[in-house]
């Protein structure tokens, strides 16, 4: 509902794109990093289930990426189209992950999701840059791809915040109230602002071109990827909370950052924009069955 509220606010009350650009930057550079630092620094990261969860999610992403590669030749996809399809099949929206994890599983689940998100961000950025450098319109410029990869990791505030939170946790140092109280206060606004921004970014007019590619990509990301995770969760004997966090991480739609990366490294940016909108809409229908299945199985 928060996503739909963001869509309505953008169309009816706050149409100025400058407003939403500012909110996105606030969420990306301040609110979400504060949430990650606070949740990871104060969480119990010693649980074996947390690390089995990380393994299950990362393996599910790799298997889905392999499935995307298997479809490239049969579908006769051009390099830039395939690069955007691959991003759509493997990238995740961190805003939605943290929002759902917080509302469905509470502080403990949010901490697990934050840790998984840190590893996911590293893996999907690596995979996206490799595929875009190889198959994008600028496929002969590996130096640019390497530079963008390093920049995407070292300059990613979510990865940096996750690293700070984990290191703080491992140090065993308590979080003084002078720091903890402001972090907690600021992070409480992160989820709402982030989800409003997701809704504001939806562009319905971009959905209807390339229906086959859009449908296949949505199937890979919203059906196959969660299915891989569901099987792996059973094999690794994840408990109910870990399985719920994992299905949230795997069943969310692609992030808008995929469009930015496609634009910078030669993917099909127009297709990527359509995938972002279509997948955010489709996920409203596909996520509830996955959540119900995992909850019932747990």
Image (cartoon, rainbow, N blue to C red):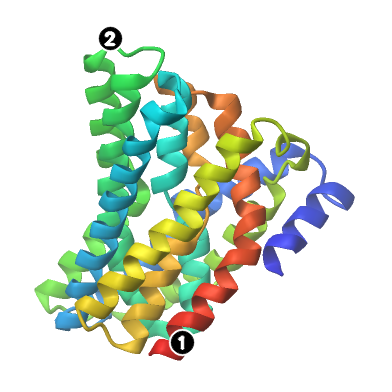
Residue 108 makes an appearance in the image: no
Q: Residue at x 21, y 77 (%)?
A: 235
In space, the residues marked 2 and 1 are separated at their CA atoms by: 47 Å
- Position of the C terminus by quadrant: bottom left
Residue farthest to the left? 171
* Among the 4 quarters of the image, the one containing residue 50: bottom left
Disc ID at residue 140: 2
- Position of the N terminus by quadrant: bottom right
* Among the 4 quarters of the image, the one containing residue 127: top left
13 relative to 68, above or below? below
Q: Position of residue 215 (x, y in %)?
A: 59, 44
Q: Secondary structure at mark 1?
A: helix
Q: Residue at x 19, y 65 (%)?
A: 55
**Foreground residue, 169 or 284?**
284
**Foreground residue, 13 or 93?**
93
Label 1 packing within 10 angstroms: few (<14), some (14-19), many (20+): few
**Foreground residue, 277 or 78?**
78
145 sits left or right of 76 in the view: left
Q: Residue at x 43, y 81 (%)?
A: 294
Q: Position of residue 178 (x, y in %)?
A: 35, 76
**Foreground residue, 66 or 200?**
66
44 relative to 36, above or below? below
Q: How many marks?
A: 2
In the picture of the structure, the residue carrying the numbered disc 1 is 295
């Amino acid at each position: 509902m928060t996503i739909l509220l963001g869509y309505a606010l953008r169309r009816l009350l706050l149409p100025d794109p400058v407003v939403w650009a500012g909110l996105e930057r606030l969420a990306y550079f301040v609110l979400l990093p504060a949430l990650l630092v606070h949740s990871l620094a104060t969480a119990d990261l010693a649980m074996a289930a947390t690390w089995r969860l990380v393994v299950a999610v990362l393996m599910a992403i790799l298997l889905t990426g392999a499935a995307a590669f298997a479809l490239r030749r049969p579908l006769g996809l051009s390099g830039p189209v395939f690069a955007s399809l691959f991003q759509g099949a493997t990238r995740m929206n961190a805003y939605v992950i943290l929002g759902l994890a917080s509302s469905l599983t509470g502080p403990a689940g949010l901490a697990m999701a934050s840790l998984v998100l840190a590893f996911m961000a590293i893996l999907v950025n690596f995979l996206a840059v490799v595929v875009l450098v190889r198959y994008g319109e600028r496929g002969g410029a590996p130096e640019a791809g390497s530079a963008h990869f390093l920049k995407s990791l070292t300059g990613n505030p979510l990865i940096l915040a996750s690293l700070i939170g984990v290191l703080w946790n491992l140090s065993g140092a308590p979080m003084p109230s002078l720091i903890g109280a402001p972090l907690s206060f600021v992070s409480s606004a992160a989820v709402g602002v982030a989800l409003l921004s997701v809704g504001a970014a939806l562009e319905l007019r971009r959905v209807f071109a390339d229906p086959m590619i859009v449908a296949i990509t949505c199937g890979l990301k919203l059906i196959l990827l969660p299915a891989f995770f569901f099987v792996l969760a059973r094999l690794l004997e994840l408990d109910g909370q870990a399985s719920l966090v994992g299905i949230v991480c795997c069943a969310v739609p692609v992030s808008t950052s995929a469009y930015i990366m496609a634009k910078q490294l030669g993917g099909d940016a127009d297709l990527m924009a359509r995938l972002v909108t279509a997948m955010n809409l489709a996920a409203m229908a596909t996520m509830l069955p996955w959540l119900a299945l995992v909850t019932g199985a747990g």
